[in-house]
Image (cartoon, helix red, strand yellow):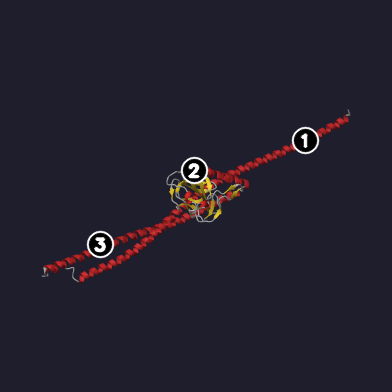
Amino acid sequence: MDFSFLQRCLAVIFCLTSSLALAQQSSDKELSKVKKEIAKQKTAIVKVSQQRRKLDMQLKKDDFAIAKVAKAINKTDKTLKSTRSRIALLNKQKTKLTLAKQQQEKALAHQLRTAYTTGQHDYLKMLLNQQQSSQVQRSVTYYQYLNKARIEEIETFQKTIAELDAVAAELEEKEEKLKILQVTQQQQKLALEKTKEKRKKTLKALRKELLTNQQQLAKLEEEETALMQALERLARQSSLAANLNGLNKYKRRLKWPVKGKIKHSFGTRKQGYLRWKGVLLSAPVGQQVSSIQAGKVLFADWLKGYGLVTVIDHGKGYMSLYGHNQALLKDVGETVEAGEPIALVGQSGGQSESGLYFEIRHRGKAMNPKIWCK
């Protein structure tokens, strides 16, 4: 065997082995680099998820804080309206009583002047005159009648004065209450603006954490699943009271919970394969949300993605849902009538614009609200 040929073969094998070893080292380095990058991305995703959860909790706190102040303002507004109405009524009563007092003063003064000028005050002089007893008796009866009428007039006058004093005292009290309420309302509005500013910062921080389409879809899926699970629990708790007759006979006869334009219709595309299970109605912040029909409040709390939500059981498997509210006016277990205010329109749950999310469900299945509301 040619020794030089063998050496050349061994040299080639060595070169190939070295090349393979270098290639393997390079691949290992690349793989290690990729693994490190994957680990880095996973850490970043976990960090973002934790940050979003933290911001979602802060958003929930902000929404509840706004709801508390908004509910207080709503209550103050009602008290202000009632107080102003009472003040207007008291002013009318005061005017009427003042006029009656003036008329009674004139009538009483006229009676006293007449009695004095005709000498009706001197009974002794009349009795000492030598007149027929029948004439004396008639005069005494006449004077007694006049005195009785005068006493009644005085008593009426005193009653009018007492009523006038009472009205004046209540009027003063209500006017003082009105001043306090106006100051309270102003303080509440300032507190509301302050809380809204805080919420804006939370929303800004949430929007910094940009989501891909896939992540956005996953987020909406999570929120919808949470809503479905909540509604399933509520369906199991649903009241079967005889006085709740469902919604079947009210098709196209019910009023919408708020007056506003439909921004998103039932069944239209939401994200990916997800569709709107209700409608999103455009409405200004603070507008009253009314129950579409009589029922019982099953849920009144905050849900991720939907904000402050009220769910009402209408019987026979029918439920209506009202989301993104600024404040909830009814508690769980309360009964409501058709058209009764149950909430105030808002933008809770992370909405950038105010509006109401509204659903109707029958035995858990979402139905088109347009079938019932006109």
Residue at which label 3 appears: 155
Task: Provide residue 261's location: percent of width, then percent of height.
Answer: 54, 56
Residue 224 in view of the camera: yes
Task: Provide residue 164's location: percent of width, then percent of height.
Answer: 32, 61
Are there few (<14), some (14-19), or many (20+) residues within 10 Å of tag 3? few
In this view of the protein, which residue sits in the foreground, 299 or 195? 299
Residue at which label 1 appears: 20
Are there few (<14), some (14-19), or many (20+) residues within 10 Å of tag 1? few
Residue at which label 2 appears: 235
Task: Provide residue 259's location: percent of width, then percent of height.
Answer: 50, 56
Name the residue type under label 3. Answer: Glu
Q: In the image, which is nearer the foreground, mark 2 or mark 3?
A: 2
Q: Secondary structure at mark 2?
A: helix
Query: Which residue is found at the position 81% from the left and 33% from the top?
Result: 14
| Farthest residue, direction front | 249
Q: Quadrant of the N terminus?
A: top right
Gap in angstroms between the C-alphas marked 2 and 3: 67 Å
| Farthest residue, direction bottom | 117
370, above or below 230, in the image: below
* Pointer 2 with pointer 3, Cβ within 8 A: no
Task: Provide residue 299's location: percent of width, then percent of height.
Answer: 48, 46
